[in-house]
Amino acid sequence: MKIINDYILQSEIDFPFGNSVSTCAYLLKRKIGNILFYSSKFIENDFSQIHSLGGIGVQIVNHRDEATSYCDLVLNEFKAPLYCHVKEEEAILKKCKVGKVIEEGMIFSDIEAVHTPGHCPGSTCFLWSIDDEKILFTGDTFYPSNGKWCVAIKDGDQEEMISSLRKLLELEVTMILPSLFIGDEKFAVVEDLKKYKQLINDCIQRLENGECH
């Protein structure tokens, strides 16, 4: 896995749809148990490295599309249950095992679940507080695409997505880590909170203008 900073590593990049859409997973190094966000078909290649870092305590996905059979590989190797929003459980169980369902609020002392429906009924972002950092895991609720930040809403609900983005506006964030991206930008370090809010407001404006991204 590639080191992003002192407490985050990134899996190998995948192109699951045979086009420009890229996906990856992230390993969070925590004193109270490491967490794997999203899933990766390459994760088995990283098992030795992950064991050396203390293993995986829990897996978390933003929504059903990130759940794959590779989640069960992680479960079997590390005894790490998969967490998802209660509204995603039924769909995810068709692909892999679910260890625990969650709803909005603090799921650990340092991680807050923010329910952000729009793409899927149970889409959920997660805000991790560590030291002075506030790191937001957005799945495909909010992701970079060739220079602008977008939402995945093709089969979703536009009004719900706008409401979800307004929730994200209220958060203090220092970094954004989505599960997918298009182009060279994989994530964002937020040095200016005003710019973060502008990215979201620009996306809201496009949705209000009838653009589905």
Image (tube, rainbow, N blue to C red):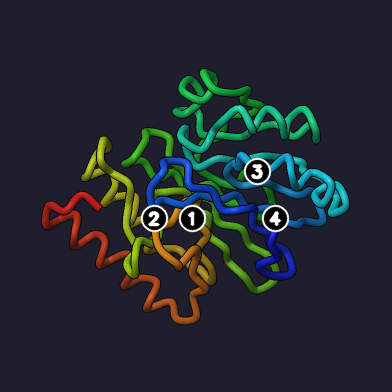
Residue 98 in percent (x, y) is at 62, 25
| Total numbered labels placed on residues in the image | 4
Q: Tell me whether circle 1 and circle 2 mark residues in contact (CB < 8 Å).
A: yes
Q: Nearer the viewer, mark 3 or mark 2?
A: 3
The label shown at residue 142 is 2
Q: Give above or below for 182 relative to 34.
A: below
Sequence order check: which comes first, mark 3 or mark 2?
A: 3
Q: Tell me whether circle 3 and circle 1 mark residues in contact (CB < 8 Å).
A: no
Q: Taking 37 as reference, is 180 left or right? A: left
Picture quadrant of residue 200: bottom left
Q: How many C-alpha atoms fall within 10 Å of the one at disc 2: few (<14), some, or many (≥20)?
A: many
Q: Give above or below for 20 relative to 160.
A: below
Kindly identify the amino acid type of the residue bearing the numbered disc 2.
Phe
Kindly identify the amino acid type of the residue bearing the numbered disc 3.
Phe
Q: Taking 49 as reference, is 16 left or right? A: left
Q: Tell me whether circle 3 and circle 4 mark residues in contact (CB < 8 Å).
A: no
The residue wearing badge 4 is: 28
* Quarter of the rendering occupied by the N terminus: bottom right
Q: Residue at x 61, y 27 (%)?
A: 69
Kindly identify the amino acid type of the residue bearing the numbered disc 4.
Leu
Q: Tell me whether circle 1 and circle 4 mark residues in contact (CB < 8 Å).
A: no
Front one among 93 and 133: 93
| Label 1 element class | strand
The residue wearing badge 3 is: 42
Residue 163 in percent (x, y) is at 29, 50
Sequence order check: which comes first, mark 3 or mark 1?
A: 3
The residue wearing badge 1 is: 178
Sequence order check: which comes first, mark 3 or mark 4?
A: 4
Q: CA distance from mark 4 to mark 2?
A: 20 Å
Q: Tell me whether circle 4 and circle 2 mark residues in contact (CB < 8 Å).
A: no
Residue 85 in percent (x, y) is at 51, 34
Q: CA distance from mark 3 to mark 4?
A: 17 Å
